[in-house]
Amino acid sequence: MTFGKIFICRFPFASGLASKARPVLVLFDVGLDVVICRITSAVHSDMLDIPVTGWAAAGLAKPSVIRLSRLVTAEKTLLFRRLGALSVTDQETVRTLWNANMML
């Protein structure tokens, strides 16, 4: 799994007691697991939210936002359907915001 791919995953709620199937963005492949973040169509305005400019080409059903503040490490087996991938432009936006705010 490589950076920029979008899948449907059972994304856990913060409590860990339940989950919801939703689009996620693969950030890092770490062996048997991946670090992913939530993609949502709900309007948010956090400093780590990134609108997906090429949402339709990425396989998303509607305008969406990448939420870099909602990270999870998940087993690859939880990613059950690939939707598509971010455009090169959207990938660079994610990398730039990540590097500016995560000190990588």
Image: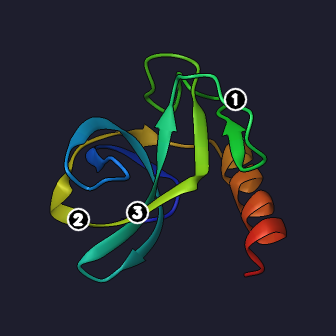
Q: From the viewer's perspective, tell me whether residue 1 is left or right of residue 71.
A: left
Residue at 20 percent across and 51 percent down: it is 17
Instruction: Look at label 2 and name its amino acid.
Output: Lys
Is 99 placed left or right of 15 in the picture? right
Q: Quadrant of the N terminus?
A: bottom left
Task: Name the element at disc 1.
Answer: loop
- The structure residue drawn at horizontal position 49% and vertical position 38%, both measured from the top left corner, is 39
- The residue to which callout 1 is attached is 53
Q: Which mark is residue 72?
A: 3
Secondary element at tag 2: helix
Vertical arrangement, residue 45 with respect to residue 41, above or below? below
N-term-proximal mark, 1 vs 2: 1
Q: Quadrant of residue 44?
A: top right
x and y percentages locating residue 7 in the rendered image: 34, 44
- State the residue in front, 18 or 104: 18
Q: Is residue 34 above or below residue 57?
A: below
> What crowding class fits label 2: few (fewer than 14 Cα within 10 Å), some (14-19), or many (20 or more)?
some
Where residue 91 sits: x, y (%)?
A: 66, 52
Q: Amino acid at mark 1?
A: Thr
> What is the CA distance from the residue labelled 1 to the residue labelled 3?
23 Å
Q: Which residue is mark 2?
A: 76
Amino acid identity at mark 3: Val
Indicate the position of residue 29 as horizontal and vertical percent values. Answer: 40, 74
